[in-house]
Amino acid sequence: MFKYAPGDDVGPLEHWPFDNPASNYKITKGAPKTFGRIDQGGDGHTSRYGIWRCTKGAFQCTEQGDELMTVLSGKCRITWLDSGETCDLIPGDTLFVQDGKRVEWDVTEDLTKVFFGCKADGY
């Protein structure tokens, strides 16, 4: 069982570069860097969960899988590029983002989240 709460030390993370062609990343502000860890699932599975961290900056991407996330630390604004709708997130906030949605992440304080993702075709 994995349990995380806002402010918890999540342990070591590895650098996850913005290099997945399916996500079609576009840096729009600063020089954000991402780090993460898959705690369960991943390649070849239809679900996964783990930890993701991003430093300050902004980027656009196409989400890969339905994802439920909870912010553990930091602040960001997510903008859905098809509608312009926004959502500001702080520690303790939970959000669901659908597979295939094009969004912009504007990380204003280094952000750490725990996530659970599902993708019918697998990751």
Image (tube, helix red, strand yellow):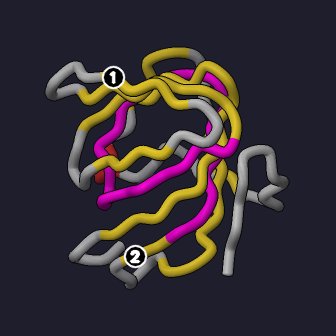
Stretch in magenta: 49-72
Q: Is residue 46 left or right of residue 30?
A: left
Q: Is residue 97 left or right of residue 105?
A: left
| Image point (59%, 65%), residue name | 50
Residue type pointed to by label 2:
Ser
In this rendered view, identify the residue nearer to me: 59 or 6: 6
In this rendered view, identify the residue nearer to me: 83 or 6: 6
* Residue 63 covered by magenta stretch: yes
- Residue 55 lies, in percent from the top left, at 67, 31
| Image point (46%, 24%), residue name | 88
Q: Which residue is mark 1?
A: 86
Return the mark for residue 47: 2
Secondary structure of residue under mark 2: strand
In this rendered view, identify the residue nearer to me: 111 or 37: 111
- Magenta stretch, main secondary structure, is strand
21 w.r.t. 102: above or below: below
Q: Is residue 13 left or right of residue 108?
A: right
